[in-house]
Image (spheres, helix red, strand yellow):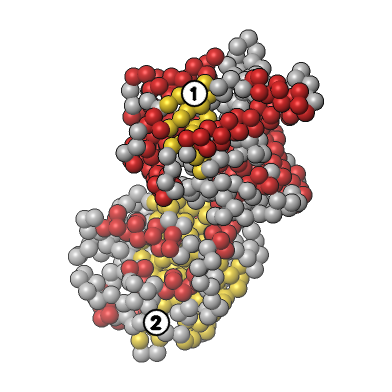
Amino acid sequence: MNYGFLRIAAATPEIRVGDCDYNKNKIIEQINLANGNGASLVVFPELCITGYTCGDLFLQKVLLDGAAEALLDIAGATAKLPIVSVVGVPIAVNGGLYNCGAVVYEGCVIALVPKMNIPNYSEFYEARHFSEGKDCQVIINGNSVPVCTNAVFRCKDFRDFTFGVELCEDLWVASSPSNMLTQNGANIILNLSASDEVIGKPRYRQALVEIQSAKLVCAYAYADAGVGESTTDMVFSGNNLIAENGTTLAQSQRYTTGVIYGDIDLQRIVSERRRVNTYVTQENATYFNFDLPVKGFDVARTFSKTPFVPNEKADVEARCKEILSIQSMGLATRIKNAHIKGAVVGLSGGLDSTLALIVAVHAFDYLGMDRQLITAVTMPCFGTTKRTKSNAEILAQAYGVHFMDIDITKAVNQHFMDIGQDSHVLDVTYENSQARERTQVLMDIANKIGGIVIGTGDLSELALGWATYNGDHMSMYAVNASVPKTLVRYITAYEAQRTSGELSNVLLDILDTPVSPELLPPTDGVISQKTEELVGPYELHDFFLYYLVRFGYTPSKIYYIAKMAFKGSYNDETIKKWLTVFVRRFFTQQFKRSCLPDGPKVGTVTLSPRGDFRMPSDVAVTMWLNDLEKQQ
């Protein structure tokens, strides 16, 4: 099973200008190479059969006839290969000449796609030889071939494998043919190009390809002319690119020849288009269907273990700064507009409540309000350790906020007596009673000072339902609601780096503290209840969450890519175990998310019932678990 992945290629052969026989052999070599490396689709540069720089030789019958013969030879030589090839060729049409991309498969030229935008400025003078393409039929050595300006090619065996073709300048204009082709179902756009090199152009070219792939939600393969083209007035570098939805997957080294590959995710493209309801779909194209067996191959694409976190350090710092700004501005706006006099944070000495306090401090500083109007409350009970209690107090003092230490042990024991709970039975009632008592204390303090309770729970906990209903699940503004646990760590580390002294030290110690709700008694003064031992590693759950919600991946596909991402960190059995836990909890705990308090969206994945994700609280999880259970 390929899970929607398809390997495509962009090739630049070394050519000789005007030598069609030589060029066709180089093209055939690269088609064989691409096929041998698992590609199902390969695109070549513009006019690669003749060379782009033939000048007035394009008006010579010898060259045009030789190009047509070479095209048919390429088709014949690759007839038995399970790969579709698109090569550049000049085609004589009645009294005119078209610059075409020829789509070749199973020994035939399926169709010719003509260039629509003919540049005739600066170093380009194509209008001297070529005409703007129009739909028609041409005869190539006795074979009738359609010339089609709006062609979309579809694979019968792999319905998401659809592509369209445009040529060089078509990408650079305001209204590209690819705009229409993608709206008519093309998930891949191939560009046959001959783009010369000038200072600054490579960076612009890459940006253009990335932006087009993002704007059209597609994969974009760009094949550029290179070594062998005439250098009389221009130099060509063979700058090949493969991008998917705004991200470059592969790029060739310039001034070289060869083939680059991109393992594109067609399911992801289709899912994203379906999600964005403003994506316009039409049925105005001419469709060409072909049969091609789905190839099995080892996906060479890489998947970050932390999809919520950028790869580069500078990008991480910028991301953390931006998220803190969004969180604090959301809270500041709520405080200002609701005329709130203060804020209350339940400070446990753990990561989430620490971030909530950081956000509150930033918001109050922005508003010019005294930090003493922030009340940080620690509420020790049966499971509280000296380390977390001490860190909570040190943190509050370091930030200069008002601090309260309220031991809730007596209140919880009284509650146990009231409801007939045996205090020696360490069950869910034993745990949740503490969480709900803490929430009651926070709410009542907020009422007393005319303030609001700031929620501490994060996105990862919401996804797993790892919160006590009407306990830590509830607040008056949930600042961490769309921040996953992996990012909570990075943001807290960012705050530690930008501060100093006692504040920085306590933040670092909090980062080093095991994640725990501290609802069960400690062992020898050490935290005994470690969340990740109970529900699984958060780095795994954040990975699962990202691909389930953001792209709608099936559990089986998530398992497939997780094995690649976490190879060497977790074995397959462990990944499947925790993915099963995640899927089951994600569906069965939806009722907690259906009544969440307000909170700011900071990224593309959020579970707010008023925002990006809506799901019935009583939905059945059976089909998703069955999908995963089939996997070995």
Q: Do the residues under discs 2 and 1 have CB atoms within 8 angstroms?
A: no
* Residue 265 shown left or right of residue 559 in the figure: left
User: Which residue occupies 66% across, 23% down?
Assistant: 411
Q: Would you call the spot at circle 2 few (<14 residues within 10 Å), some (14-19), or many (20 or more)?
A: many
| Image coordinates for residue 247, horizontal then vertical, percent | 43, 52
Q: Earlier in the sequence, mark 2 or mark 1?
A: 2
State the quadrant of the C terminus.
top right
Residue 453: x, y in percent? Answer: 52, 38
> Which is in the foreground here, disc 2 or disc 1?
1
Q: Residues within 10 Å of mark 1 (few under 14, many from 20)?
A: some
Element assignment for label 1: strand
- 544 lies left or right of 109: right
Please provide percent x and percent y for residue 109.
Answer: 52, 74
Query: 540 or 184, which lies in front?
Result: 540
Residue under pointer 1: 404
Instruction: Give the residue type that dot 2 points to.
Output: Gly
Residue that numbered label 2 is attached to? 133
Q: What residue sits 66% from the left and 19% below the top?
A: 410
Q: Residue at x 78, y 25 (%)?
A: 421
